[in-house]
Amino acid sequence: MNRTMTRTWTWLVLVSSLALGPIGSAQASAQEGAQYTITFTRLWTGTSHPFEYPKQGLLTGPHLSGLIGCSHGGGYTLFKVGTPPTPGLENLSENGKHSPLDAEIKAAIAAGKAGALFETGPIRDAAKTETTTVRVTDANPTVSAVAMIAPSPDWFAGAADVTLKEDGKWVDTKTVEMFAYDSGGDDGTTYEAADKDTSPKKPATVLEDAHFVVNGKKPPVATLTFTKQ
């Protein structure tokens, strides 16, 4: 190859690289997704939900358990109204424990149905918040999370299928409300009801009794705020 042809070939390669560079970068960025900080805020108090609100106590008083959830695609459901609870969701809603729900989420991640697991500590002081992080991608652009409402038979705060990509872009910030649900694992009807295991398990339902409906309205028990890093 003579010197002129070599220069021409080098020039073509350089132009092609410059032309394709932004496209390649955009594709890589889409694959990488986005990282979010999640702020878990408790709204459930004796003022917001006064009916039979539990008595205060150092360790046994009213609180929300640690949050647990994941990023995922359309093939995964953490909880769904009308569907009986998994063993993990039942134990979370009855005892506030993340196991075996964390193992169920990890199995979904291994199967390619979920992207990333996240967790926080409990909120005992309603004036405080808990934070964690989660990564979302085009394959796993939505987030679901749950936390036990404690004490209770099997009640939990939940947010399902929160979409963080809108109009083709990752949102800068988004706040969603978490409402109260009954997992279907226990037949108790008051905060401190004796254990009354449900067999077979019942479908999960939205709680709409006097505990969670105030003056005809259903105030949220918590919020999740997603802030892109």
Image (cartoon, rainbow, N blue to C red):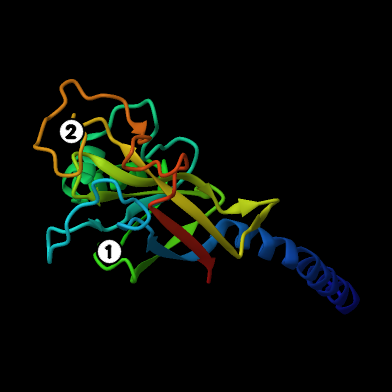
Percent across and percent down for residue 175 are: 52, 58
The furthest residue to the right? 4
Res 90 → quadrant: top left
Residue at left offset 26%, top offset 41%:
155
Which numbered marker is on residue 188?
A: 2
Quick check: 188 left or right of 25? left
Image-based side of 173 in relation to 158, left or right: right
Say whether disc 1 or disc 2 marks the residue closer to the N-terminus.
Answer: 1
Q: Tell me residue 194's x, y (percent).
A: 9, 37
Judge whether 39 appears above or below 95 on screen: below
Amino acid under disc 1: Ile
Position of the N terminus, as image quadrant, is: bottom right
Image coords of residue 126 (percent x, y): 32, 66
In the structure shown, which secondary structural element does the residue marked by tag 1 occupy? Answer: loop
Instruction: Give the residue at x 85% y 74%.
Output: 11
Q: Is residue 30 left or right of residue 198?
A: right
> What is the crowding at mark 1: few (fewer than 14 residues within 10 Å), some, or many (at least 20)?
many
**Where does label 1 land, which residue?**
123
